[in-house]
Amino acid sequence: MQKLVVIGAGMASGRMLEHLFEAAPGEFDVTLFNAEPRGNYNRIMLSPVLSGEKSYDEIVTHDADWYARHGVHCRFGERVTAIDRARKVVLGASGDEVPYDKLVIATGSNPFIVPLPGHDLDGVVAYRDLDDTNRMIAAAGPGRRAVVIGGGLLGLEAAAGLRLRGMEVTVVHLPGHLMERQLDPAAGYLLRRALGERGIEVLCGANSKEIVGQDGKVAALRLEDGTEIACDILVMAVGIRPAAALGREAGLTTGRAIAVDATMTTSDPDVLALGECVEFEGQLFGLVAPLYDQAKVAAQTLLGQSAAFVPREVSTKLKVTGCDLFSAGDFAEGEGREDIVFRDPARGVYKRLVLKDDRIIGAVMYGDTADGNWFYGLMKDGADVSAMRETLIFGPGFQGGAPADPMAAVAALPDEAEICGCNGVSKGMIVKAIEGGAHTLDAIKICTKASGSCGGCSGLVEQVLALTLGGEFVKPAVKPVCGCTDLTHEELRRLIRSKSLKSMPEVMQELGWKTPDGCPSCRPALNFYLLVEWPLEYRDDLQSRFVNERNHGNIQKDGTYSVMPRMFGGMTNADELRAIADAADKYGAAVKVTGGQRIDLLGIRKEDLPSIWADLGAAGMVSGHAYTKGLRTVKTCVGTDWCRFGTQDSTGLGIRLEKRLWGSWTPHKFKLAVTGCPRNCAEATCKDLGVVCVDSGYEIGVGGAAGIELKATEPLAKVATEAEVIDITVAFLQLYREGANYLDRPHKWIAKTGGLDWIRERVVDDPDSRRALIERFDISQSVYQKDPWADHVATRAALYTPLADLTKEAAE
Amino acid sequence: MSWIDIGALEDIPRQGARVVKTAHGCVAVFRTLDDAVFALSDRCAHKAGPLSDGLVHDHKVTCPLHGWVFSLETGQALGADQGSVPSYPARVEAGRILLDAARLTAGATA
């Protein structure tokens, strides 16, 4: 086996290794150095991580398992200090020497730090890798201030992310308009306005002079004109420099970067280089598409195949949610160039095509970028557009008089048209994959890589799917909460947390709800997420709850309600039974004993609810919450008190559990049982959480179900004392409250977390985590463990009565 | 029209409803987020569910029993469902809710 050493685990080298292992598994024994203490991840997606829309785990491209499978020796967190080409070894920071037959340098780039006075102050950060991102996230917070120097792609994505985290953000940009390399001034203006509407202040033509510090920490940025902008962090995003030092010191030919030929080989035939650290014919590379091309060529070169890298036109999209922007080619004004411009100020749409000799040489779009790839295709092909010049700007749907069907634009694309710019995947390749059986976005991603990098083309790929499969294509596995938003439940929860959104109007405003006040799907979910996240600050919104939780009873088919008082652990007494019997007489109720060991009073009219509650309350009873997505009942057997076989005090434990837990709201209903021996009279093994008492202690199982689905619990822990049972139960319940999607029962949630190990670690194994969960639960209980019946009798009784009674007037 | 004062706007919670009893059954009076007021029969066209206990969103209400959605402005069922419930003229003046007495006493068929 040949020894291959790769320096740098970025997007280019990751892709190269994939090609290599795919084409020739077992051919190379690979050692992978990375200065960052982690493996390959999708650097393009750091912006969504910064904004809180994605987590780091979601952007990892190669995990430990992948490296292990391919026998890669990972040296993550270890910088390479030198290359000795004469002896063919690289020297790691650990002092180890690693020999190579072939070496690939993929050291990427370093952020350029403007040498302003104060640039070394604490709080001045670049925006390049996960550590930078985490530093920004740590510094972010509502009301805190950030300054971003640089209004290019990276700077604006940083600004938008920090703004989403609730910071006051100012972007300071030296040129006259934003993204001057990709946009013309008009599109730059629209972008600036859109950012302004999001609360991001933009200063163009602004020259930074000095970073002002206080106690060694950044405090403000001072501009040439004397303006001072206060800030808690300052992000430098003015550009990158190829990280070519290692190659230069090793004596390889370098200019601004390490020079390579079309086979990606450096001046040393055994050393290759690729990515942002190379130059080819004097050209540098920063976007991902040409890097992937290089990765393919480098892999082929290593395998002894002939291949040549050809730089290609690239297009750019900005990954700021809600700012739709597309740019490709050259759009400076010049001799012999013509413009076609389309503006729709009301919609904030701007499109401009630059033509030369009847060919498109540049395209800029803002606000509506659906046709971007079509124009880009025409541009790359050098197509003569004179025949359609009149209607060109309206896009492919208007050529040849076809109706403006949203699918028409995709249908009109030729097979060679590029759909995924990052990975160079054409429409034809996707169609072929679909015909080969890839019928979902994920399947397409796996077999073609389309939409696997920046994800910007996901919509297009789905359109190709819909076009090719017709009615068979069922859209995505990731489902938004409802029609009011495109966010999923997971994204919504994460944004509520990261942006400190503490009320329903705030959520709807900040996250761009499409309806004025939501719908019956999102409102109850939002209400739950907010009250779990901010128990002390958020006020429970009854108008956003389903009828049962608003009126604290179960509505029946005739509009009457059922009333079920709580009987802790299923124990009651003669006084309670007498009060229940009296109430049944007084309000004409039907009486039913339930499966959860309670007594249900059915057929109560809405206007009688406050008085029956008052009657039951006078006998010492509280709401049984039989109508909630919340803590329901703890079912018990008689245990050691009476039973010949009982091993523990199951009734007592059940009562203690219920007293601790009642009143809490959960994503879906939550039922428990404690049974005194494995004969399981209390049916603990089909509950959301069930405790089975045995001689030596208590077995706790979770994730059972006995509804439409029938499922036995899975063992979570076995413990010796009641106190531990209660602690673990509380911690499990809180983790479920914090983690599960609204309307997912625990067994569904457990499946989504990937099994019990993750949960066990947090509620059983790690005492600190368990304690923190219990603390958070108790804070919530300080607000929510109160009897809603007594509360409504005292404060809302009038709402249960008619506003007016006009029956008499009719009689007159 | 003969307007009759049935109560204060504040008596109904925003995004909520209360009923008015009439000889012909209950009328649900809704108050939306933007403080508009609407009156519909309190019997869903589907299975007579009490619309006054539904979730109010935009100028719509979702029935608490089986999720039918009605326009508060017209009483028409929205989406895939077909049907309608009678609606009654309603307005707010100086913080008081006024309904058309003649329509209320004449019943749903008027």
Image: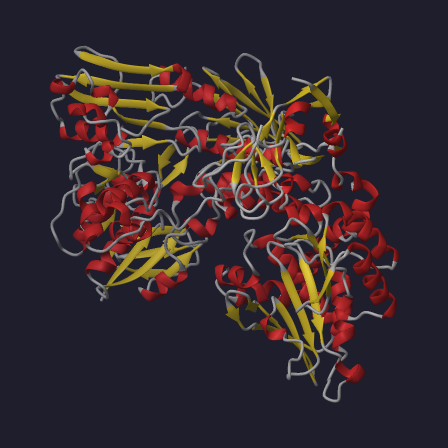
In this picture, residue A258 sits left or right of residue A216:
left
In this picture, residue A554 sits left or right of residue A319:
right
Q: Is residue A158 visible?
A: yes
* Label total for image: 0
Q: Is residue A449 visible?
A: no
**A553 shown above or below B84:** below
**A518 shown above or below A670:** above
**A488 shown above or below A635:** above
In this picture, residue B89 sits left or right of residue A245:
right
What's the colour scheme? Answer: secondary structure
Q: Which image quadrant is residue A694 in? A: bottom right
Name the one closer to the observer, A788 or A213.
A788
Q: Which image quarter holds the C terminus of chain A?
A: top right
- Residue B84 lies, in percent from the top left, at 51, 35
**B8 shown above or below A646:** above
Q: Residue furthest bottom?
A: A644
- Residue A157 lies, in percent from the top left, at 45, 32
Name the one closer to the observer, A364 or A238.
A364
Q: Residue furthest top?
A: A335
Q: Which image quarter holds the N terminus of chain A?
A: bottom left
Q: Which image quadrant is residue A103 in? A: bottom left
In this picture, residue A251 sits left or right of residue A530:
left
Name the one closer to the observer, A686 or B29.
B29
- Residue A152 lies, in percent from the top left, at 40, 27
